[in-house]
Amino acid sequence: MLASILWILMMGFFVGQIARRLGAPPLVGMILVGIVLSPQVFNLISADVLDAADELRTMAVMIILMKAGLGLDREKLAQQGSVALRLGFLPATCEAIAIAIAAIVIFQFNLPTGLLLGCIIAAESPAVIVPGMLRLKSLGLGVTKGIPDAILTGSALSDVLLLLVFSLLLNFLRNGGVEQITILGIFTFNTLHLLPIQVILQIFLGVLFGYLAARLLVLLLATQNWTQNTVQDTVITASCALFLVIVANQLPYFSGYLAAMSLGFFLIELDAPLARRLRGGFDSLWVVAEIFLFVLLGASIQLQILEKVLLPGILVLAIGLLIGRVVGWYLSTVGSNWNWRERLFLLPGNSAKATVQAAIGAIPLAQGIAGGEIMLAIAALSILITAPLGAWSTATFAPKLLTKGEVDPTKVTVTTPTLFLAAVDTSNLATAVLTKVADLARRSNGEVIVLHVVNTSHPSAIRQLEKQTKKLLSDIKYEFLTVTGAIPEEIIRIAEAYHVTAIVMGKRGHQPLDILIGSVSQAVLETSQVPVILLENCNR
């Protein structure tokens, strides 16, 4: 089992990075690794890991939905609330119906079986859509109109709806008819009549339990300070979210995944500093979870079954996407303030399939439903085609179709590197400057540029300065630069060229020529657009 985990992590990571360097999404490489490691090819994943694949996928989906919740913007959702709700129902419903009609014609399915296939295929993948939308938010693309937030919310709601209808249809086909429910021995309903109530209940209770869990976490982690660092905050929060998902699987009266996403959303509203810390923690968890999710997705794909329905399967997917989902997208955005480019973005941004198809695609076959083998093959085909295509097209077309707005760092992780510029001379003042910049870099996990402006040639003094820099910054990534010219102008030029976070320098030195004197520091302070940290009188 340990060897299997090692294969998954190492090959998944490096092949994913190879795919990224070739211009493809890393998940493409990870899915290919899963296929290669699967029992159908080299059989390098142990049976224990394959048996635990569903549980591992559940954890990964929980993590990505927590990331989604921690990135939602309440104001943008309120602005696009009706669009988000319509995106949660109309595209998935239209696609499922279109796929059902196509399956009836192509595979001679009956209506319930065709709708069952439609529910499997129409579900959207949080593992592909959430990272893509959060990346757009970090770049400011579409944020002015709340487009990424509307897509994130809509995809979560659509999955709740489709999973409910899938369960209902599965019971119907397995039992050979509509299940009757009698309440108090008086009122008799069938499950079809109860579907709207089930959908509302799942959504309402999912949001409610997410809110209650958020209140509990704020009490424990922020008010009473039961934890001491971000790692502990993340572990406790992830455990709480996973508990919600597990309870929902045992008591299917609410959506556990929606509860996890709501938990992240309410944490922003209740305690923004805690949410910011957790955002970084879940980013780190996703690095590992993403590899397991997509490698195990690849390992679950049945190649021999896929071959049998390749061309008709592609036709069914195309009908569902290009007819059903496009109609749903149009109806969802009618009357909104979205222009035609933003509506067109829904085609790449809201069509990826992966996690839900891998989770439920094989259930009809396992339950003995007629056509289950075809459903599994088309589910696998949808993953192979739409997951990499959706990830690639989102990154490619978003800059062309969406308007760039202002990034809100309180709602998304802003990954700007911390880079300090240490302006030093060859006097004793350099030691204080280097010591200070080293402390700042360690606290912020940043990097350093050490700049020495040469006015006179003293090679031995410069070599001594390089040696001192290497000693004081031994555990920090740094670059040592020497330039010639006017000291203030060169400091500002290098700072702007490298987009540094701050300039660290001293006010005065001892040597008459090769120093940063008070007039130099004053000139930098007056003209620099970059913040300046000045060590005043630090040589005394």
Image (cartoon, rainbow, N blue to C red):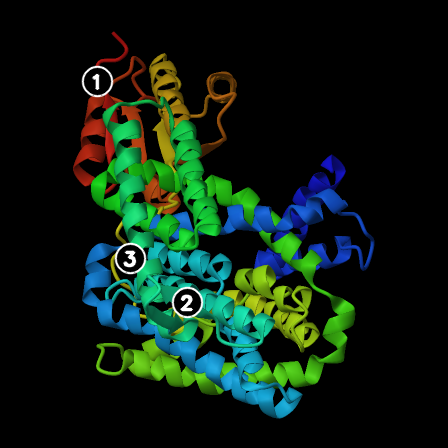
The amino acid pointed to by label 1 is Glu
Q: Which of the two residues, 144 or 198, is positioned nearer the viewer here?
A: 198
Residue receiving disc 3 = 204
Instruction: Find the residue positioned furthest to the top.
Output: 540
First-in-chain label (3 vs 2): 2
Q: With 538 as the anchor, is 67 left or right in this view? A: right
Task: Choose mark 1 or mark 3, whichever is in front.
Answer: 3
Q: With 300 as the anchor, is 145 left or right in this view? A: left
Residue receiving disc 2 = 181
SS class, disc 3 = helix
Q: Position of residue 514 (x, y in %)?
A: 35, 22
First-in-chain label (1 vs 3): 3
Q: Residue at x 53, y 88 (%)?
A: 101
Instruction: Find the residue positioned furthest to the right.
Output: 42
The amino acid pointed to by label 2 is Ile
Task: Choose mark 2 or mark 1, whichever is in front.
Answer: 2
Q: Residue at x 23, y 68 (%)?
A: 80
Q: CA distance from mark 2 to mark 1?
A: 80 Å
SS class, disc 2 = strand
The amino acid pointed to by label 3 is Phe
